[in-house]
Amino acid sequence: MDNLKSYLSKVRQFLEQFKKVEQKKKPPKLKTLTKKHVNLAVVGGTCCLLFIGLMGSIRAITLSNQVSSLKTSIENFEKEKADSPSTTRQYDYRLQYYLNDFVYAYFTLSQENNKQTEQINHLNSFYGALPDTKSQGQVRNPSEVIYSQLITVTDKVATYRVKYKEWIKKDNNTEKKEITTGFNIP
């Protein structure tokens, strides 16, 4: 027990060495500068400002040269663009309306028999001469267009993306199926 007390007192003495001692507060002292130090500070500040201005003017000169070279390259690019044929979509909207009507007539077939004949006659009106009908035992199912989108018109071939619903009869059940397909129109 005595050893423990002696050990604690030694630890306390050791820790008291690090006790914060309050210092007396003194009024702040003003530093006196010589004329030489003040002149050095003023000349150094002036030199710094002149250096920054010089670097800024050099940068402005180099950037102005780059701007003029960029301007000439942009003008050359604009000339090349004007000379080259445009590759953007520029086809007659009458063609697009005609093709939209054809796609709608081609992919739409009513479930009622009397409307089917009207729709087939409307589809045949798009052809200059009626195409040969070769029946291979296939039955056309009633269908309806959900959407059609003209993708490209190249070399007298129009490409469409078509999504349509088709009602398929199996035995006594009718199955509704949505189909998305690509469709080329010569």
Image: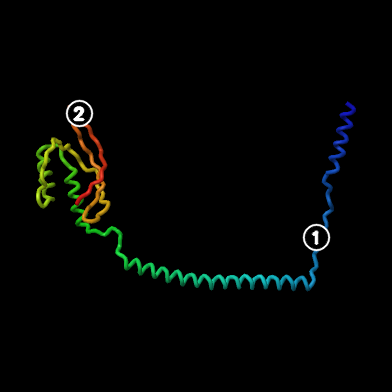
Residue 107: percent from left, percent from top: 19, 43
> Taking 83 as reference, is 11 above or below it?
above
x and y, in percent, of residue 3 in the image: 89, 28
- Nearer to us in this view, 95 or 35: 95
Residue depicted at x 81% and y 62% = 29
Which quarter of the picture shows residue 144?
top left
Neighbor class of circle 1 (other Cα within 10 Å; few <14, some 14-19, many 20+) is few
Horizontal and vertical percent position of residue 152: 26, 53
Amino acid type, mark 1: Pro
Which residue is labeled 2 in the image? Answer: 173
Colour option used: rainbow
The residue at the point 18 percent across, 27 percent down is: 171
Above or below, 31 against 112 in this view is: below
Element on which disc 2 rests: strand
What residue appears at the point 24 percent right and 47 percent down from the top-left corner?
A: 148
* Left or right of 76, for residue 97: left
- Position of 38 with respect to 181 (left or right) is right
User: Mark 2 and mark 1: span between their CA atoms?
Assistant: 102 Å
Residue positioned most to the top? 1
Rendered location of residue 116, percent (x, y): 12, 40
Secondary structure beneath dot 1 equals loop
> What is the number of the mark on residue 28?
1
Left or right: 19 with respect to 83? right
